[in-house]
Amino acid sequence: MYPLKRNRRLRSKKSLRNLVRETTIHPHDFIVPLFLVEGKNIKDEIPSMPNYYRFSLDNISKEVKQLWSLGVQAVLLFAKVPESLKDNYGTEALNNAGLMQRGIKEIKDCVPEITIMTDVALDPYSNFGHDGVVENNEIINDKTNEILSRMALSHAEAGADVVAPSDMMDGRVLSIRNTLEKNGFHHTGIMSYAVKYASNFYGPFRDALETKPGFGDKETYQMDFANKFDSVSEAKADIEEGADIIMVKPGISYLDILRDLKNSLNSPIAIYQVSGEYSMLKAAAQKGWLDHDKVMLEQLISMKRAGATMIASYFAKDAIKLLS
Ligand code: PBG
């Protein structure tokens, strides 16, 4: 009761504020997404993602070495696949000499200690830009799962530590887990994009990989952002199927969902601060309308405060440099 309890007391001095602060951000909190492209000596800025690049494999080791020296513990790989290699079944995704598989090996050779995570979904390989096999304008669940599990296996064989299915097919974690177990990859982790919404914040990412869906949208498999009845059950199902880490995506608009999961699960939880979130802040900062560094840190702290164990973020490098 006032004035016995004055909330301003603990805010009155910087050292006191530092002392009572609950949430901090550390280099180990980050997963860094990396975009791989074919070619030589390529470091290509993504137009809708200022200061973020696609790397050819000869340039990727330098980047990963730098990330490792900054204290980053994990990278999450995405491959930009040439149009000519795309088909309805994502055949190229299973090529053991494909860009993703070579990228994994390259990074494993240069920085064996870093955790290599890989995106498992058909959209970069699909001529429809969808995350699954298309028949009669529908995304076919179980056929897709078969391909995803072989794709995950080929990443594991190349040296991936954690495979990250981002497709939202039902039952795909179980089918990936069974395939990995059968083939002796008992220690390959699964980070499941368990709670992934049909969000409008993915636009710049789809520019980066040229994966805009050719028809329709992803609302028959990604979740309706107006709902939360299925968020905890999606996550629990994936944990039962063998997921080691649960991911929520996107980030800042979904902190209520993240907190629900934190309160209901005993699992590490990742959140993905997606491309549109990155681009919005970059654009506002370029216009001088927001303080880039301060807003960036506020958003990262907010995600940790809401319950994130780790954050996949295009801001990782910017943030870590600022922290040190
Ligand atoms: C696709 C995938 C997407 C992202 C990660 N994996 C896009 C989508 O679902 O269309 C988005 C990441 C971002 O926007 O940063 N499987």
Image (cartoon, rainbow, N blue to C red):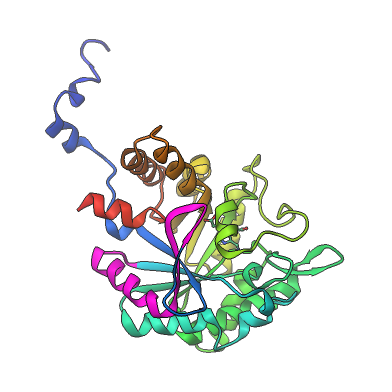
Residue 120's x, y, as percent? 57, 71
Decide: is 3 above or below 142.
Answer: above
User: Is residue 70 covered in magenta?
Assistant: yes
| Nearer-the-camera pick, 269 or 213 | 213
Q: Residue at x 35, y 85 (%)?
A: 109
Question: What residue occupies the far top of the structure in this picture?
Answer: 3
All told, the count of numbered labels is 0
Mark yes or no: residue 185 visible: no
Mark yes or no: residue 234 visible: yes
Q: Quadrant of ligand 1?
A: bottom right
Magenta stretch bounds = 45-73
Q: Residue at x 72, y 70 (%)?
A: 127
Residue 230's x, y, as percent? 64, 49
Q: Quadrant of residue 170?
A: bottom right
Decide: is 95 above or below 80.
Answer: below
| Nearer-the-camera pick, 215 or 37 | 37
Residue 98's x, y, as percent? 56, 84
Q: Quadrant of residue 139?
A: bottom right
The N terminus: image quadrant:
top left
User: Is residue 315 covered in magenta?
Assistant: no
Q: In the drawing, does residue 207 fall left or right of residue 259?
A: right
Q: Residue at x 42, y 36 (%)?
A: 287
Decide: is 20 above or below 89.
Answer: above
| Nearer-the-camera pick, 180 or 274 | 274
Decide: is 157 above or below 26.
Answer: below
| Nearer-the-camera pick, 101 or 141 | 101
Question: What residue occupies the far right of the structure in this picture?
Answer: 136
Residue 71's x, y, as percent? 26, 64
Q: In the drawing, does residue 314 fall left or right of residue 153?
A: left
